[in-house]
Every structure is written in C-alpha cells, then in structure tokens.
Amino acid sequence: MAEKKFNPLPGFGLTMGYTVLYLSALVLIPVAALFLKALQLSWHDFWRLTTDPRALAAYKLTFGASLIAAFVNAVFGTLLAWILVRYDFWGRRFIDALVDFPFALPTAVAGLTLCSLFAGNGWLGRFLVPLGIHGAYTPLAVVIALTFVGLPFVVRTLQPVLENLEQEIEEAAATLGASRWRTFVSILAPTLFPTVVTGFALAFARAVGEYGSVVFVSGNRIYETEIAPYLIVIRLDQYDYHGATAIAAVLMVISFAILILINWLERWASHFQR
Amino acid sequence: MGGTVQSNFKAGRAASRRGTEEPAFVKWTLIAIGLVFALLFLLVPLVNVFYQALEKGVGFYFSSLSEPDSSSAIRLTLIIAAITVPLNVIFGLAAAWAIAKFEFRGKAILITLIDLPFAVSPVVAGLVFVLLFGLQGYFGQWLDDHNIKIIFAAPGIVLATLFITFPFVARELIPVMQATGAEQEQAALTLGASGWQTFWHVTLPSVKWGLLYGVILCNARAMGEFGAVSVVSGKIAGQTQTMPLRVEELFNSSRISEGTAAFAVASLLALLALFTLGVKTWVEWKTRRDHKLAQRAEVIGQSQA
C-alpha cells in the first residue's frame, strides 16, 4: 500500500461524502451533543451526579452482572462452538442456526419470556424456586438475561477460527506422542485464547449497554436490581437532564474504551492465526 | 442420543486413530453439556413465547392482536421499519463501496465509527436525541416555535431507530465487497460500461446475498428496538407505541389476561426473529454453494488450459 495505485472506479467522492455526511448527522453530532451537555456541568456537579450511592449501586450491578454473564458465555460459548464445529450429532444444524436467536430476538421479548420462565409458576421457576434459586426479580435474573443476549458473540467469533484451524498440527502433536489433553493444553488453548477473549469482550460490551431484557426480569429495585441504563431513564422521567447526561457520559466513555479494546483484540487474535 | 453414537462410530474411530479426537466419553459429555445449555437458554425461551401466547386459545390470540392499541402498534412498527430500512440500505451501499473498493487514510477509524452504535447503550442512543430535539434540548425551543414535534412523536422514533440499526447493512456488505475485489468492476469499465451500469450489473449481483441478510437483520432490529425508542417515544398508546413498547405496557398491567396479550404481540416479534434466522441459514447455504460452484469452474478452467 506504499505506492498509490491508480483506481479507475468512479463514485469515491459521492459515496465517501454521503457516508461521512450521514454518519455525522446521525451519530457523531448527536454523540457530541451529549458530551457538550456533560461539559456544561462543573466538575463538582459531575462528580456528585455520577457517584451518588444509587448510581454507584447501579454501576456495580451493571458491570458485575455483565462480567459474570460474559464469563459464563466464554465458557459455554467455547464449548458450544467446539461441539458445533468438531462433532456431528443429531440436531447440530438446528442448534447452529438457533445460536443467533438471542441476536435476532427483540430484547423486550427476551425479557418477557425469561421472566415468565423463571417466575415461581414458570417452566423453570417451578423447579428452581423451591430450591431457593430465584431467577426473576433478583440480581441473578440480571445475569441470566445478560447471558442470554450475549450468547451468540463468543460462539460466532470462535466458530470461523475453529473451522480454519489446521488439524495437521494436532496430528503432528499426536504423532510425536502427545496425549489429547496435552495437545489441547499446549496447542489448542493458546491458539484459541485470544479469540475467546475477543468474544468475551464483545459479549461484555453488549451486556453493559443492555436495557430491554433486563428491565423486564430485574424488577428494578433501587440499590438492588437497578442497572445503570435504567437509572438514566429514571432521571429523564424526573426531568433531571443533568443527572441523565452525566451517567450517560460515563457509560459512553466506557463503551468507547471497550470498542477500542475490541478492535485491538481482534488484531491481536488475527495475529495468532497465522 | 444413543442412536447417534452408532452412526458416528466409524468417523469417530477414523479421527481417533489420527489422534485428533477426544475419547468417546469426553466427546459425549461435552455434547450433552452443550445441548442442555442450548436447550435451556435458546429453545425453552423460544417455545415458551408461543406456548404462553396461545395459552388462552387461538380465538383470544387473534382478538388480542386486533385490539385497537395493539393493531395501531403493529402499524406504527411497520411504518417505522419502512422508513428506516431503505435509508440504512442506501447508507450501507455507499459506505461499503467507499470502504471496500478504495484505499484511503483513516479507513480503520471510519469502520470503528460505523460500529459505534453497536457499543452504545440503546438508552444513551435515545437520550442524545432528547438532548438535541427535546423541549430542553439544543433545538427544542426553535422546534417548538415552529410547531415541529420530533421527541414524543414518530420522527423521534425514526431517528432513534436509524441510529441503532445504522451499522447492520454496512457491516454485512463491507466484507463481501472486499472479498470480490475491484477487478470485475474495472473490467466492466474497460469494456465501456458506465459507473451505474457497473454497479447494477456487476457489483450488486455479486453481493446480493450479503445485502439480503443485512436488510433482513436491519429490519428485525428496526422492528424490535426497545430501549432507544422507549426513551424518545413518550409511549402514548395508540399513537407513539411500537410493538415492543406495547409488549411492555401489557406486561406491566396487573390483569392476567393482559399477560397473555403481551405474549401474543411478542409472538409476532419472535416469528420475525425466526424468519430472520431462516433467511440467514438460507443465505449461508447459497453463498457456500456459489463458492463451491466457482471453485469447480476454476478447476475445470485450469484443466482445460
């Protein structure tokens, strides 16, 4: 790419101009407006609004539950990707297609169905609630909802990598006398690890911003099951625009950071595949 | 699961001879765990939607869908999707053309910015438009003076939905357009085709499956968006209530029959999700077949040469 090649294709100016215009009008200017609004606050006010106990409790739940959900997804998503790529079993294609279901399903519907499943009289709740496992209107409910919405990310990130993995390396290891477990630990795990981390980060990013499914299942109790995006909505409903903006700015900065991290992770992971 | 052990026995033995497969009990334990997880987290929630929706019978199901507030929510959702999807398709095509066919500085930054709506919480996406166009917002006073309503009205819902669904078409198209390269277009131009002709007859057919999936995904998201829309819509039943917001209102109502009605509206959105998955599977099958045919044609071409 050092020398500039002559490209005879037309339309660069038009399409590039339109892309930048549309992107600016719809995304960049509105996002800039948010930060402009946040900058109108004095540092003292900003700190007070973003660190009041209710907000702190909401961050703790949002990030804590997102971390747990992303971790569950990293474990089970890796397992699912592995069995979908490596094994053949009855219903494999069906499960494979179904993995994208949480991605295609509107979050409100996800919240609705999960809430009814884990409620005391629901299909799963009637077995779990007697055991003391309350999967609705508790912090656990938030984790379950976030696990559901994040499920496709680890599987779909890992699947193409697993498919392109050259089995010859594993064969070579086996020929050299390595046990299957040894091959897994010293060859497969290090190769796949960066991709699993990328999938983890994607699931985490999705979970931190998630709103629809969580408000249905959590019960939204102050200090207990209230997530940060819900607190923004509460502040807006109270016409507290400064409060809403301050918390939104915090979430936005964290989203930016995760997005940059994911980009970096993807490059790191693709490095490992060569 | 016992029956499948038999059928895979041969393949399994061949692989384990090469030392690249786990012992059978490890393999089947992994499959069992994976299936239970998929069953609990994917299949049961899906089946539950339809079961609950039809619990009070087919008659109740259809009457709760045709109830005025629900049917007006369905209509509004269809209108919103009909406006937002074409706009994002045009953007997606333009962005993919510029990014996939040309080299320029700052490309990586542009792609990251296009991804931005994926990372932003839907609630924050709604909030930014309230800050711009709400009564207390930057343009609020001016809009109010000119009697233009954006927030708590349909235009606000359109804007929030555009923001949320903005990356989908572009993200599907960019890799497909990059994979096809620019040689075919350059050949068409050399042979005297105009820019538009090249686009319609060369580029578009080569990316049609990716475009189709992008459109379907964008549509599913546009119809199903909840967080961003709930912030800007004002949730006025019969006026600014989309289907997901209608589901929420019915869910929050204390009457038990409304719970079933919530599932009835939700079941339409679940059907939409299933349709989206169906199209995705079909598109993947198509592209794989096209790819195989192209490879075979290449092999035949080489053997003849």
Image: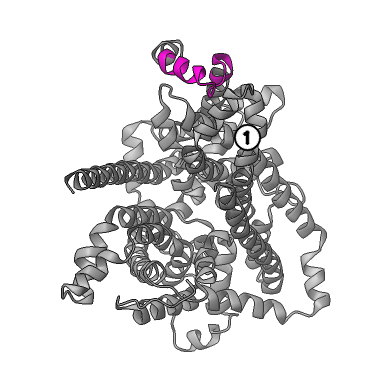
Position of residue A204 measured from the top left corner of the image (x, y, whole percent): 63, 50
Identify which residue is drawn at 61% across, 43% down. A196
Q: Is residue B299 left or right of residue B63?
A: left
Q: Is residue B211 left or right of residue B53?
A: left
Q: Chain of mark 1?
A: A
Magenta part mainly helix, strand or loop? helix
> Residue B57: which quarter of the image?
top left
Position of residue A260 measured from the top left corner of the image (x, y, whole percent): 63, 63
**Crowdedness of circle 1 by 10 Å Cα count: few (<14), some, many (20+)?**
some
Nearer the observer, A121 or A36: A36
Let me know if residue B90 appears in the view: yes
Identify which residue is drawn at 18% across, 49% down. B305
Position of residue A112 measured from the top left corner of the image (x, y, whole percent): 52, 42
Identify which residue is drawn at 34% across, 67% down. B93
Identify which residue is drawn at 57% across, 14% down. B25
> Residue B192: which quarter of the image?
bottom left
Q: Does the magenta segment cover residue A36?
A: no
**Residue carrying label 1:** A187
Nearer the observer, B73 or B231: B231
Query: Would you place residue A48 above or below residue A262 in this image?
Result: below
Q: Does the magenta segment cover residue B21?
A: yes
Query: Would you place residue B114 above or below residue A114 in this image?
Result: below
What is the span of residues highlighted in magenta in the rendered image?
B9-27
Amino acid at pointer 1: Ile
